[in-house]
Amino acid sequence: EKEDGVDLVILGKQSIDSDCGQTGPLLAGFLNAPQATFASRVERDDDGAYTVERETDTGTETIKLNPTNQPAVITCDLRLNVPRYPTMPNIMKAKKKPVQIISLEDMVKELGLNLDDVLTPKNEVVEVYEPPSRKEGEMVASVEELLGKLKEKGFAA
């Protein structure tokens, strides 16, 4: 259930423990909420939906998260934000703001889950290996030669 009208939860794209990018998808699964991962751009539409441009292995993809009873969960890519540096007066104001602390036990109880199930690892690293080395590139002298090579390999018509 939404807490105080929260419509969006933003997280980093991965954690430092196993670097598997599971925190956002796991939270979205627990909440039965719409999710987008590796977001590089987020816009809120007039109807309350979120349009998310996300990074993929082959470029970018744009998806739309329609509004639901649950907050949308979005994990952020490096390019989503340009950091702003806080001013000293704002730092002092922030120090005076209350911070609500929610214990893990309370959160698990509110979600209707079992603490032991939550603490049990959900993934197993089976193998870690280096990717195969890439082929050496070819230098071309002109655009025409580049287009010829691309046509030859079936990348251009």
Image (spheres, rainbow, N blue to C red):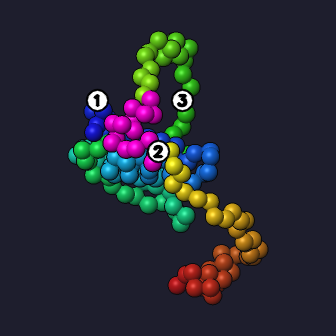
Residue ID for mark 1: 4
**Contact between labelled residues 1 and 3, with CB atoms less than 8 Å apart:** no
Q: The residue under label 3 is which amino acid type?
A: Arg
Which image quarter: residue 133? Answer: bottom right
Q: Earlier in the sequence, mark 3 or mark 1?
A: 1
Image location of residue 120, percent across then percent down: 51, 49
Q: Taking the image as drawn, is residue 75 in sight?
A: no
Residue ID for mark 3: 84
Disc 2 packing (10 Å; few <14; some 14–19; many ≥20): few
Residue ID for mark 2: 116
Q: Could you give the CA–CA distance between mark 2 and mark 3, rounded to whole angstroms? A: 40 Å
Q: Could you give the CA–CA distance between mark 3 and mark 1, rounded to whole angstroms? A: 27 Å
**Predominant secondary structure, magenta span:** helix
Q: Which residues are magenta?
A: 103-118
Q: Could you give the CA–CA distance between mark 1 and mark 2, rounded to whole angstroms? A: 28 Å
Relative to 155, residue 10 above or below: above
Q: Is residue 73 left or right of residue 145?
A: left
> What residue is shown at x 56% (from left), y 14% (from top)?
88
Q: The residue under label 2 is which amino acid type?
A: Asp
Q: Earlier in the sequence, mark 2 or mark 3?
A: 3
Q: Is residue 130 left or right of residue 118?
A: right
Identify the element where label 1 is drawn. Answer: loop
Which image quarter: residue 139? Answer: bottom right
